[in-house]
Image: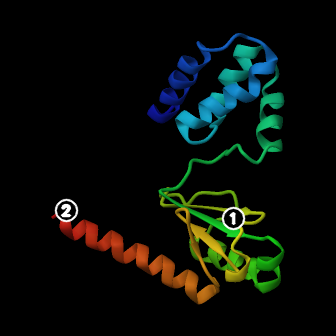
């Protein structure tokens, strides 16, 4: 077991002390654990299932049913591709495909270096800017594959600049 997994178990157990062992507490417990850990790792879900005396598959079923819960750790940078009607019509799926190819991950996943996580949203309310990608809570307008490259290049340049300043 890794140090990170041990930390997840310890943190989950600390959170569980605030709750009674009622099955009705499952969602509040999951929300609290995710709020602390940033996502719901396997080991945390197993501890929660044991605490509530329910099968682990029931915990997993709730986590995968509600889109508020994450099974992967968040990245340092959050990428959200809008797939609402306007974005869909203007190429939202093309933008999503570009992000998936450039980051080499699928929607709902995080890059192995935990630099980026990628997901989709139903609508961000910026329909006149379609297709929109929200990068670290900042909407980016008319995101086409070349713009994806530009956004990722700006992150690389920022990272290089920061590493030079730390020398």
Q: Nearer the viewer, residue 133 or 52?
A: 133
Question: Looking at the image, which residue sits at the far left?
Answer: 167
Residue displayed at 78% across by 27% down: 56
Residue 86, picture quadrant: bottom right
Q: Residue at x 60, y 30 (%)?
A: 33
- Which mark is first along the chain, 2 or 1? 1
Q: Which mark is residue 166?
A: 2
Position in image of residue 118 (x %, y %): 63, 63
The answer to whether 36 appears left or right of 29 in the picture is: left
Percent x, y for residue 1? Answer: 52, 30
* Observer-nearest of 50 and 126: 126
> Where is 130 relative to 106, above or below?
below
163 with respect to 138 (left or right): left
* Alpha carbon separation for disc pair 1 and 2: 33 Å
Q: Which mark is residue 106?
A: 1
Mark seen at residue 18: none
Residue at 59% across / 12% down in the picture? 17
Q: Residues within 10 Å of mark 2 (few under 14, many from 20)?
A: few
């Amino acid at each position: 077991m890794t140090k990170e997994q041990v930390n997840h178990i310890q943190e989950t157990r600390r959170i569980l002390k605030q709750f009674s062992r009622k099955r009705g507490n499952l969602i509040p417990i999951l929300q609290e654990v995710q709020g602390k850990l940033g996502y719901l790792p396997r080991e945390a879900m197993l501890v929660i299932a044991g605490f509530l005396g329910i099968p682990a598959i029931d915990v997993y079923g709730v986590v995968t049913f509600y889109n508020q819960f994450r099974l992967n750790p968040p990245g340092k940078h959050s990428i959200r591709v809008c797939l609402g009607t306007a974005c869909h019509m203007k190429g939202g799926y093309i933008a999503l495909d570009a992000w998936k190819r450039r980051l080499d991950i699928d929607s709902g996943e995080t890059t192995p270096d935990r630099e980026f996580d990628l997901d989709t949203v139903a609508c961000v309310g910026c329909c006149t800017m379609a297709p929109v990608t929200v990068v670290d809570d900042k909407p980016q307008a008319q995101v086409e594959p070349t713009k994806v490259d530009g956004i990722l290049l700006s992150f690389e340049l920022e990272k290089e600049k920061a590493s030079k300043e730390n020398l």
